[in-house]
């Protein structure tokens, strides 16, 4: 097996472990972080991406998101032959990451059994206001911003010189993307919970459906297409815009 797939799996697992973990920490009963709020969640998800990138970046490039893999491929920055393997690895990593969050916070899930919506929210996203087509538009726009900025980070226009050596903004590591995720969460995330990543949403949603969680509700399958189709449309728009502009 190509090591790139293994590291995409591991990186996405770490991303969801930290990301769903901060949702659980801020939401579940008797958690010491309960009520910490949206800012902590947005910061936590940004740092979750950073941790995943630090794990997978040196080997796979740390896409950690099917929308990023497809967007990069459309823009000619990634091989199409690797896309399916990356997506499978990302989805499996997202599933196991969510399972580990449940194991870690199992006592707190039991203590929150009377709040099924809260439990679901620690696994996957649901809209603040039910309006599927606007929810879809929000996910598409947020993902378009995500992928477009990721592509822009690697352009010559974002290069700088240090000691006579040219370097791109992206070469300083995961920090620019971490800031990007935090900015999306704080500015564009409040309507849908900013999935912007099918592996972050669909895989944990499936884990929620399969795990024996006391007091859980349905897994919101009526909405599940939005955090999948929205990001995939958004990544295609971002790649097209990148090719047009750059």
Image (cartoon, rainbow, N blue to C red):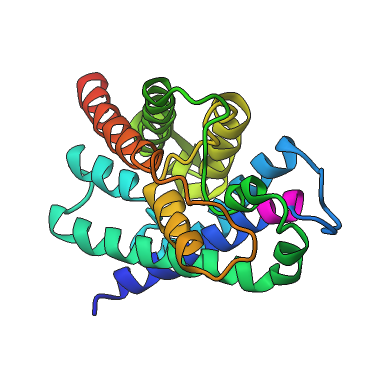
Residue 223 visible in the snapshot: yes
| Residue closest to the eye, 232 or 128 | 128
Image: 98 above or below 74 = below
Residue 11 visible in the snapshot: no
| Residue closest to the eye, 17 or 121 | 121
Which residue is found at the position 58% from the left and 63% from the top? 17
133 sits left or right of 131 in the view: left
142 sits left or right of 101 in the view: left
Q: Residue furthest bottom?
A: 1
The quadrant in which residue 187 appears is: top right
Q: Where is residue 170 in the image (x, y as percent from the top left)?
A: 45, 44
Q: Where is residue 86 in the image (x, y as percent from the top left)?
A: 28, 61
| Residue closest to the eye, 6 or 140 | 140
Q: Position of residue 123 (x, y in %)?
A: 55, 54
Which residue is found at the position 55% from the left and 71% from the top? 212
Q: Give the range drawn in magenta.
A: 22-27
The N terminus is located in which quarter? bottom left
Secondary structure mostly seen in the magenta stretch = helix
- Confirm whether the magenta stretch covers residue 23: yes
The quadrant in which residue 157 appears is: top left
Which residue is found at the position 21% from the left and 56% from the top? 83
Q: Residue furthest left?
A: 81
- Confirm whether the magenta stretch covers residue 121: no
The C terminus is located in which quarter? top left
| Residue closest to the eye, 139 or 78 | 139
The quadrant in which residue 75 appears is: top left
Which residue is found at the position 42% from the left and 66% from the top? 93
Image: 186 above or below 218 = above
Q: Where is residue 110 in the image (x, y as percent from the top left)?
A: 73, 66
């Amino acid at each position: 097996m190509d090591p790139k797939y293994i590291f995409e799996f591991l990186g996405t697992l770490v991303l969801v472990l930290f990301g769903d973990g901060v949702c659980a920490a801020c939401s579940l009963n008797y958690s010491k972080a309960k009520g910490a709020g949206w800012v902590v969640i947005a910061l936590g998800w940004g740092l979750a991406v950073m941790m995943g990138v630090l794990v997978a970046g040196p080997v796979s490039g740390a896409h950690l998101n099917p929308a990023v893999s497809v967007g990069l491929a459309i823009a000619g920055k990634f091989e199409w032959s690797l896309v399916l393997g990356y997506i499978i690895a990302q989805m499996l990593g997202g599933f196991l990451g969510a399972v580990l969050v449940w194991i870690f916070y199992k006592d707190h899930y039991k203590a929150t059994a009377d709040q099924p919506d809260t439990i679901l929210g620690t696994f996957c996203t649901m809209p603040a206001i039910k309006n599927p087509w606007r929810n879809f538009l929000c996910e598409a726009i947020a993902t378009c911003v995500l992928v477009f900025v990721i592509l822009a980070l690697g352009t010559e226009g974002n290069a700088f010189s240090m000691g006579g050596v040219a370097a791109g903004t992206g070469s300083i590591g995961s920090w620019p993307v971490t800031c990007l995720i935090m900015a999306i969460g704080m500015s564009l995330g409040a309507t849908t919970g900013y999935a912007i990543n099918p592996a972050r949403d669909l895989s944990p949603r499936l884990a929620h459906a399969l795990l024996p969680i006391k007091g859980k509700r349905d897994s919101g399958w009526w909405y599940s297409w939005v955090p999948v189709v929205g990001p995939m449309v958004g990544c295609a728009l971002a790649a097209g815009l990148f090719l047009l502009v750059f």
